[in-house]
Structures are given as C-alpha cells and as structure tokens.
Image: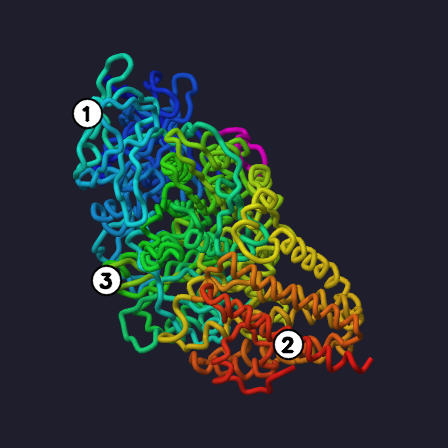
C-alpha cells in the first residue's frame, strides 16, 4: 500500500504514559494503524501501533507495555507501515514469540511476502461452503458434532478440564478419509502456562513431524499486550499457507479468555465506554475478525480449519467470552465438570454442543445413510434421559415407569460406551455409528421417532414395541 | 456545484474527524483519503465534522483530503437488483470479487447496478399522459419471477412529451421525457437514487389482513405474522435463528425476499448463495434466487457498513413495495446492527445508556420497524413489507436492551428456546413465551381460504392443551406421571403428539420442510379427533395405557413426514383407520362395563 513510503518519522515528545498506552505530540504523516518501534534508553526495542492519529495527539499501543519507558530517554520511531508479518513456507517447523520473532535459537526465515496481520475480509462471494468431514476418531465429535474442513469449532472448557488432551487427540487422529494432501498445523498460544506449551510441543513433535507445525507462543508471563497480535500472526501465516501454498491448515488458538482479558485491559487504559462486564463494545467485531478468517475459498485447494479453545470463567456459558464466540463460530464443543468428575473422558456436554456445518457434510455418500437420523435421535433421547434423571431424583428410581427405566439404562450405556473412550482410542465413523445403534437398541423401536423406518429395519438390534 | 474539500483532523477506527467541511450537511456522503474510502457525515462539533467510514481506515493520516460528494448516502434503484448480492453500502460483491479477488480490498469501488446491460423495456404510458410521482411508467421482465415496474421518481410530475418504444435500453438511457408544470423538460431513466435513511412516501397505510404463509406450522398456525407485519426472532446462539430465517426466506409467500446478513457468518451467506439457485418456490416452481436480493455484511466486514446495511435493505424493499409487491425482509441479526450503533457511539464518546448502548437505540429500532407495513403505494397498487428481525441476546437473556426495545415495536414474537434446541426440537419456538398480535386480523382469511374446522377455534384448543400440559408436567415432575389421573395424562400425551407430530418440523426433510396451511389443518384435525375420542374412552373407564398402545398413536407423529402436501386425501384415509381403531376399542371394552 502507498502509505508504506510515507517516510520514517521519529519523536520523543511523550505527553502521557499509562498501561500499554503512550500519548505523543502530533507528528505529520503518522497514520492510523501504523507500526511503531520504541527504543528505550538501554537500547532495547519494543513494538507498538497507532490507535489514534490526530492533529492534537497520537495514541500508541505498546505491546510490551510502558513499564521501564522513560519519557526522557525513549524514542518512538514510526515505521511507515501497518503491523506486517513476513511469511514463508520456511516458517513451518519453527517456534516464534507472540509477535512473530523466532525464539528457537535459529535466525528469522527469509520471508516470501510481507502481509498486514489484520488481514482483509473474505468476500462472501468467494467462499466455498465447507463439506468435507474431518474424522477425529472421537465419537462425541464425529457422531454428533462432526468437524468439517474449513469450519471454526471452538472448545468451551473450564479450569481443570482436559481440553488440552482433547485438542491433542484431535491433532493426533484427524484425517480426511481417503485423501493424502499437504497439511500444516499452526498453533497460537496466548497466556498459557509453560507446561501446557510444553505438552503441546511434545504432542506435535510425536505426531505431525515438527516440520509441519508452526508455533507462536505468548506464555502466561509474557506481556499481555502482545496477545492482541499473536492470533493475528498465526492466521496471517495460515492464510498464506492455505491460499497461496494450497495447504490444509489446522489452526489452534487459545486460550481465548486470555486474549479477551488483554483486549479489556487495553480498552480500559484508553478510557473507552465499556459494555458487558467491562469488555469493550467492539469485542464481537474483534473476535469475528479473527474467527472469520478461516474457511474455504473458490478456486483454491487449501483450507483453514480453526479450533479456538477457551476457559469459561466460572463455567458460565453466558459470560461474554463464550457467548460472543458462540455467536460467531459454527458451533461449539462444551465440556462438563460433572462428567469429568465421574471420570468420563472426553467429558463433552452434548446438549449445548453443536456443529452447524455437520448437516451438509454427513449422510449418504460421505459418512453413512443413517448418520443424520441417528445423531438427531441420540440428542433427543439423551435430552429425555436428563429429564427423567431429574424426575428420578425427586420421586426415586423405583417409581419410574418401565419406559422411563429403559431410558435411564440407555443413558448410562450411552455415556459409558458411546461418549467415553480412551485418549488413544481412534474410532472410525462406522464404529461410532455401530456403538450408537447398540445403545439405541436398548430403547424400544417405537421410541425412535427421529429415525426413518427403513433404517430401523436395517440397523436396530433390540425389541420393537413398548 | 464544486464540492467542498476538507481535511482529516484525527482518525480512530471507523471514526474520522475532519475540518473545513462546515458547508456539508449531516448525512452527506464523503470520500476520505487518496483511495477514496466511503464515509458519511454523522455530526458536527464546533469546526469539526464527524464522519463514520464504511471501510478499514488503516493508512489514513491527519491532513488527508475529505471530499463532500454532495448527496446523502443512498442506494441505486432499478433493474439489476434481483438475484444480486451487495455489501452494506450496496457494492455488488460479485463485481468486487472480479476486481479484488478473494478478499475485499480497501477502497475498491463499483457501480451497484450494471450500466452496460440492456433490458427489454415495455412502456406503460403514452405521450400526452399526465403523470403523478411514483406512477408506473413501464415494465421490465427482470427475472422469470419478477416484473420490474419502473416508477416515476418521487417528487416528479408532469405531462409525457416523449416515451421510448418497446425495446432494449440500459438503465441510464432516457426512456421518458416529461414537461413539468413549470415548463421544464426532464428526462427520466430506469435508474433512480434514494437516500437510505429516509422512508419512501406512500398514499396511505392499510390494516394487514392477509397472513404471510411461511410453511412452518408453528408460525402459520400458532403465531402468524401478517403481510406488512413485524416480527422478531430472539434466541441465544445455537437456537436456530438463522435456520428459521433461511426457512422463511425460502418458503414465505412473498413476491420478493430481501435477506440482510448483518454482522453474521460468512459461510451462512455462502450457504444461501449455493442453495437458493437450486431451490424452487413451492407455488410458482421458479428458482428462489430470482426473487431474492441479498445484503451481506458479515461480522468481519467494516462495522459502519453493517450499521448501514439494514437501511440499504429496507430502502430496496420499499422500492419494490411501491411497485405493488409483497416484500419479506429478513434481518439477521438486528443485535449486530445495534452493536454497530454502540461501537460507533462509543468512538464518538457519547454518553451511554443501558449496557453501553446509546440512548437513541430505541428510537432507531422503532424507526426501522415502522418502515414495515401494508400500504397503498403512490403507484396505486397495494404492496407490503413484512419485517422479520432476528435478535441475538447476550447469554440468551431476553431482558437485555435490544430484545426489550424490539418487543415494543413488533407484534409477533417468536421466542427461541435453548432447551428445545438442546433436544433438537426445531424450530425451537417456545409456545409458552411466543405471541402473535395478528390472530384476530387473520381469522377471516383462514376461514375463507382453508377448508376444515375453524382455524381460530382449533388454534385456541391447541394452545390450551399445550398450556395445560405445561402446568401438569410441572406437577408430574414432583409426584410422578403415574400419580396423575388418566384424563390429565391424556393431556400430557396429546401435548407430546402436538409437539412431535405438529410443532416440530425438519428443515432438511424434503417432505416436511414446507407445509401448506391445508396440511397443517389436517394434522390438527387428526390430533384433536384423537384427543376427543380418547377422552370419551377414558370416560368409559378404559385405561390410558391401552390407548397409548394403539398403533395409530405413534403413527400420528409420523404423518407430517409420510404425507406430502399434494396427497392430502391420505389424511382422510388415516382418519378413517383411526376412527375404526377407536370403534373397535369401544366395542371391546364398552360391552364389558
């Protein structure tokens, strides 16, 4: 873009320093979104960007915060370009910090292209509707919340729940049936613990060959201000790999809760009008600008599939972070504390979980003819189980009708045989559906209203009638 | 008139403050910077003019030029709208794609309507005719579905001194010359503009009396909306707002459908684009895309353009209404629009009211919904706009400001329920919380158009069974269902029939996706007959389980899937079988007592 050549500008005239914000005296030629470099008295450098360019003042966000910056000795240099990331296929197999600088001891790879990390909106006309399923080998996902290539499907977790293990299992087991294609994994960590990062690194090393993986790590003790940029670096690289190198890219970003906290911190330090729980009013748009960067586009081989994970504060799904995420993503996998405590892995809470793209991707010709009906029936029957369990709590199990007792039996079998599986157990779709029929056959066939008669005839193994 | 040129004073996201534009009225369109980003003047403070910019402002520098375009932000109206897809400020996305590839580049510009295409124009007026504003001057067969009636622009009247013969013209070609009362000659083309924030005038507003048939039983039968009515669909994420909106866009008995994807997912728009060309209107058999206009401003597209998108959509709707069409407008989602208002208000440092929303939120919502209605247009034809607005309340909490204010302006409220969605009961419209204010106005239509029992009576009976069952289920949850008297258990079981066999409707089923009012009536007749006959059996002392074990009982739940709209005689056959089954039971047990 033209703005790149507006020349190098430098200033020392700080008017204000607070949190991650520096307010500077105006300087001609500074533009909105411009990247800045702050050189401290000791020669160290920090990056930032222009949040407001005006004739009375310039507001700059400094990614590593203003701590240690003295207005006397620091200098601010405007770099004449927005925040750009140099990208190349060489970045696969490397580890970077949250701003895209290598931290694995090797030099910066030579970049093929410089890209604005904010990206641009995909034209809805260019999108190709995602239809190829990704088999994860996890029954609760493949059978009931099928993941589709090009989908954004977050995991809503809570403190202490095994979302890392589930993500790891997906990384290990994900396949698209009958296809061998170029794939890559881009992992962006925001504010996660060192041991978590190490865990992922080991998983990735053991399965995918590290030369297919790029990691951007902003750990819990790294500057929170950086977290705003970290996912953008990851997605910028993913876009490059998917749409220019024809790769199928799986992007895993998290913890989104830490990202949103950083956003709130920044917003507060700018004295912005807060909306719910102090989060900025533009958080929906901001998250959408990340999540919507995934998908498939017409005429390109590659794709971006996005799995963000987040910890719901206090397991509250209506908290702004999961809530706004759920409004943007194409479904959600929700984890449950109660199932986890009962020792069920993966503890996926099915009633609130959903994959929006599943319906067009499953069924005859892709998974199996009965898949849509079976998934529907499992949801409906399991909902009935929940209702009967709450009834049994009050009146006692003995008082239940025969029909209701059958449902309870189904409920336990469903949780123990269908939902629960080993951390290394990789089930085919066929296996998943067969287990589904095994447990559904506990119920009388007359209770399976969601399944077409022809499938009942073909797959049902129990006794008809009440 | 030479347009005023000012310069950027400051830039903060989508808000640009400029100086030197004192002569520019609020509402005018401006272009900002070298690449000419589209913006709109939203206010003036001292010598500063406040502008909201419809594109990403990265790269804008204080001192950059701001040029007054001399007219308010408006849409282009004329042949070429139908089947098209625009962004929030009416840029044609297909043309944008040809120009800038898979991403929407900043500052890319294109005419909303194709200037080079020729349309077959058929004049409907002759030389010497005295014309009034808004009158139909000619027709263009725009798609197989829609005849575009070319209107004389509002504010223009006079005598025809020349009219083009039938033939092919571009939208900018003059097709009519008019002499006004002041003696001026004015050339009229098929293309006109209208400022989006101003409603188009009509002769008078009429009372809505015809239902918008949506093919969705729970809506048409229990909570109907009238042509020209307003309705809201609130629901948390995953409750099926978008699927319901898509179902309405597909099957609604409207002449024209305008679908505004306002701050929602890109893939949902793609789905509409992929699906609609292959779907056919159940009434005319023509491809649905040919009656549909899509406004797509997805969540990651600039927020100010999202704010404009609902106005762009409703102005186009008014234009077709003025031609005498029934237009259904779906806005998905009005909450994202409200959030755009909030975001911009926040950047303007306005004092917030509830939850950070600006104090004018309610009046903006009111203005928008009031543009719906059933009217006699200036052309003399009757037309309507039915507005169906999705609302996405944070956390599914209906007490938040957007839902609360929306409730004041709509007469039909389809409350989507997370619990029903969790059971995969779709459409997840909660029958206890939803309502329709059009029931009385529409009763006459049903009585005249649909054979069978009286709609309003059936409707009342169904609602009361559902409500009664809801109450009884709460009791049953405390004492167990077996402890209830048989008559009450029958109410619960009949409600289950209504829920599974009638209210629940599978959008992906070929047979059940669209249901005619006639078929809906038939199903209800069967269910009510079942209830009445079963009640009388219970009165004879027959046990409830005997009735529930009847084969017809579980078959009722499948009728919706098994009998297509064009085989309604099958219902009569089923009714006969059911009556026979009941008679047998009566005979068997009746003699014993």
Q: Chain of mark 3?
A: A
On the image, numbered disc 1 is attached to which residue? B162
Q: Does any portion of residue A165 appear in the rendered image? A: no
Kindly tell me whether residue B464 is visible in this rendering: yes
Judged by depth in the image, the label closer to the viewer, 3 or 2, is 2
Question: Is the residue under label 2 in contact with that under label 1 (CB below 8 Å)?
Answer: no
Residue A364, position in %: x, y?
Answer: 38, 75
Q: Please report the residue visible at 55 percent of the width from the left and 50 percent of the height from the top.
A: B446
Is residue B76 shown above or below B7?
Answer: below
Q: Give the secondary structure at mark 1.
A: strand
The answer to which of marks 1 and 2 sits earlier in the sequence is 1
Q: Nearer the viewer, residue A203 or B244?
A: B244
Rounded to the nearest whole Å, what is the CA distance between mark 1 and mark 2?
73 Å
Mark 3 lies on residue:
A245
Point 44% across, 51% down: residue: B252
Residues at discs 3 and 2 both on one chain: no
At mark 2, the secondary structure is helix
Give the magenta-colored segment's residue range: B349-361
Of B231 and B448, the residue lying toward us = B448
Q: Nearer the viewer, mark 1 or mark 2?
A: 2
Q: Which residue is mark 2?
A: B580
Residue displayed at 40% across by 59% down = A188
Name the residue rendered at 46%, 29% in the picture.
B348
């Amino acid at each position: 873009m033209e703005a790149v050549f507006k020349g190098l500008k430098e200033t020392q005239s700080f008017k204000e320093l607070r949190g991650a914000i520096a307010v500077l005296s105006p300087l001609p030629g500074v533009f909105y979104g411009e990247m800045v470099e702050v050189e401290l008295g000791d020669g160290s450098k920090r990056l930032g960007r222009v949040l407001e360019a005006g004739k009375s003042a310039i507001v700059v966000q400094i990614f590593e915060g203003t701590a240690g910056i003295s207005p006397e000795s620091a200098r601010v240099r405007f770099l004449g370009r927005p925040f750009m990331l140099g990208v190349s296929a060489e970045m696969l197999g490397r580890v970077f910090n949250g701003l895209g600088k290598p931290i694995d001891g090797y030099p910066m790879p030579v970049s093929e292209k410089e890209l604005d990390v904010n990206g641009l909106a995909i034209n809805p006309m260019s999108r190709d509707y995602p239809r190829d399923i990704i088999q994860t080998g996890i029954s609760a996902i493949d059978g009931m919340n099928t993941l589709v290539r090009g989908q954004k499907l977050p995991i809503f977790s809570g403190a202490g729940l095994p979302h890392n293990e589930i993500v790891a299992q997906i990384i290990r087991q994900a396949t698209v049936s009958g296809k061998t294609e170029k794939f890559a994994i881009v992992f962006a960590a925001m504010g996660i613990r060192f041991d978590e990062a190490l865990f992922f690194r080991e998983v990735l090393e053991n399965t995918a060959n590290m030369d297919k993986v790029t990691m951007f790590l902003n750990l819990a003790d790294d500057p929170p201000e950086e977290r705003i940029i970290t996912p953008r670096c990851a997605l910028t690289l993913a876009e490059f790999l998917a749409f220019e190198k024809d790769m199928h890219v799986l992007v895993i970003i998290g913890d989104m809760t830490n990202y949103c906290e950083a956003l709130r911190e920044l917003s507060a330090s700018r004295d912005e009008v807060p909306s719910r729980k102090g989060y900025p009013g533009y958080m929906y748009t901001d998250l959408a600008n990340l999540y919507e960067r995934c998908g498939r586009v017409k005429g390109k081989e590659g794709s971006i599939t996005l799995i963000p994970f987040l910890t719901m504060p206090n397991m509250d799904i209506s908290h702004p972070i999961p809530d706004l995420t759920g409004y943007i993503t194409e479904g959600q996998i929700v984890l449950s504390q109660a199932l986890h405590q009962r020792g069920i892995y993966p503890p996926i809470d099915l009633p609130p979980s959903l994959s929006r793209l599943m319906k067009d991707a499953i069924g005859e010709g892709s998974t199996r003819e009965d898949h849509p009906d079976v998934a529907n029936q499992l949801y409906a029957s399991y909902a009935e189980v929940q209702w009967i369990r709450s009834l049994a709590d009050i009146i006692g199990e003995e008082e239940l009708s025969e029909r209701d007792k059958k449902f309870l039996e189904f409920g336990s079998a469903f949780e123990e045989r269908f939902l629960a599986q080993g951390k290394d157990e990789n089930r085919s779709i066929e296996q998943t559906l067969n287990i589904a029929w095994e447990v559904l056959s506990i119920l009388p066939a007359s209770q399976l209203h969601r399944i077409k008669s022809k499938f009942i005839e073909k797959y049902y193994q129990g006794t008809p009638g009440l | 008139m030479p347009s005023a040129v000012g310069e950027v004073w400051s830039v903060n996201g989508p808000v640009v403050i400029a100086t030197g534009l004192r002569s520019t009225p609020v509402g005018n369109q401006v272009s900002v910077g070298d690449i000419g980003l589209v913006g709109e003047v939203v206010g003036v403070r001292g010598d500063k003019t406040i502008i909201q910019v419809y594109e990403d402002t990265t790269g804008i520098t204080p001192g950059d030029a701001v040029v007054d375009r001399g007219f308010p932000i408006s849409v282009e109206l004329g042949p070429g709208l139908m089947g098209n897809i625009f962004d929030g400020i009416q840029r044609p996305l297909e043309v944008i794609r040809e120009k800038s590839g898979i991403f929407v580049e900043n500052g890319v510009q294109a005419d909303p309507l194709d200037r080079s295409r020729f349309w077959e124009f058929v004049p409907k007026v002759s030389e010497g005719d005295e014309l009034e504003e808004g009158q139909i001057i000619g027709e263009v067969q725009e798609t197989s579905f829609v005849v575009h009636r070319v209107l004389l622009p509002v504010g223009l009247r006079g005598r025809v001194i020349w009219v083009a013969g039938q033939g092919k013209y571009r939208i900018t070609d003059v097709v009519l010359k008019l002499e006004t009362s002041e003696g001026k000659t004015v050339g009229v083309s098929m293309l006109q503009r209208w400022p989006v924030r101003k409603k188009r005038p009509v002769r008078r507003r009429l009372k809505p009396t015809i239902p918008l048939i949506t093919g969705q039983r729970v809506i048409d039968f229990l909570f109907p909306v009238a042509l020209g009515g307003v309705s809201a669909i609130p629901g948390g994420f995953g409750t099926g707002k978008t699927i319901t909106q898509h179902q309405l866009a597909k099957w609604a008995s409207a002449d024209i459908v305008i679908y505004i994807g306002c701050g929602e997912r890109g893939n949902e728009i793609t789905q509409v684009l992929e699906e609609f060309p292959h779907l056919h209107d159940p009434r005319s058999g023509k491809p649905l895309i040919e009656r549909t206009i899509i406004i797509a401003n997805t969540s990651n597209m600039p927020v100010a353009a999202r704010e404009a998108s609902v106005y762009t959509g409703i102005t186009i709707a008014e234009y077709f209404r003025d031609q005498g069409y029934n237009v259904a407008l779906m806005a998905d989602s009005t909450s994202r629009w409200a959030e755009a208002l909030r975001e911009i208000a926040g950047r303007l440092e306005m004092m917030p009211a509830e939850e950070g929303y600006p104090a004018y939120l309610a009046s903006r919502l009111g203005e928008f919904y009031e543009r719906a209605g059933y009217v006699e247009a200036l052309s003399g034809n009757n037309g309507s706009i039915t507005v169906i607005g999705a609302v996405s309340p944070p956390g599914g909490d209906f007490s938040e400001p957007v839902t609360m204010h929306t409730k004041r302006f709509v007469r039909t409220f389809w409350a989507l329920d997370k619990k029903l969605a969790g059971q995969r009961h779709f459409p997840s419209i909660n029958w206890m919380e939803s309502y329709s204010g059009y029931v009385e106005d529409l009763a006459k239509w049903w009585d005249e158009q649909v054979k069978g029992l009286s709609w309003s009576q059936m409707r009342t009976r169904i609602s009361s069974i559902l409500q009664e069952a809801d109450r009884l289920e709460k009791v049953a949850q405390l004492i167990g269902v077996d402890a209830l008297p048989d008559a009450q258990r029958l109410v619960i079981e009949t409600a289950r029939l209504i829920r599974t066999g009638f209210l629940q409707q599978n959008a992906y089923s070929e047979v059940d996706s669209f249901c005619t009012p006639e078929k809906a009536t038939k199903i209800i007749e069967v269910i009510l007959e079942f209830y009445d006959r079963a009640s009388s059996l219970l009165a004879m002392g027959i046990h409830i389980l005997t009735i529930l074990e009847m084969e017809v009982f579980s078959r009722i739940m499948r009728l919706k899937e098994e009998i297509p709209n064009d085989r309604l005689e099958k219902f009569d056959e089923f009714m006969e079988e059911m009556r026979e089954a009941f008679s047998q039971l009566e005979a068997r047990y009746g003699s014993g007592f």
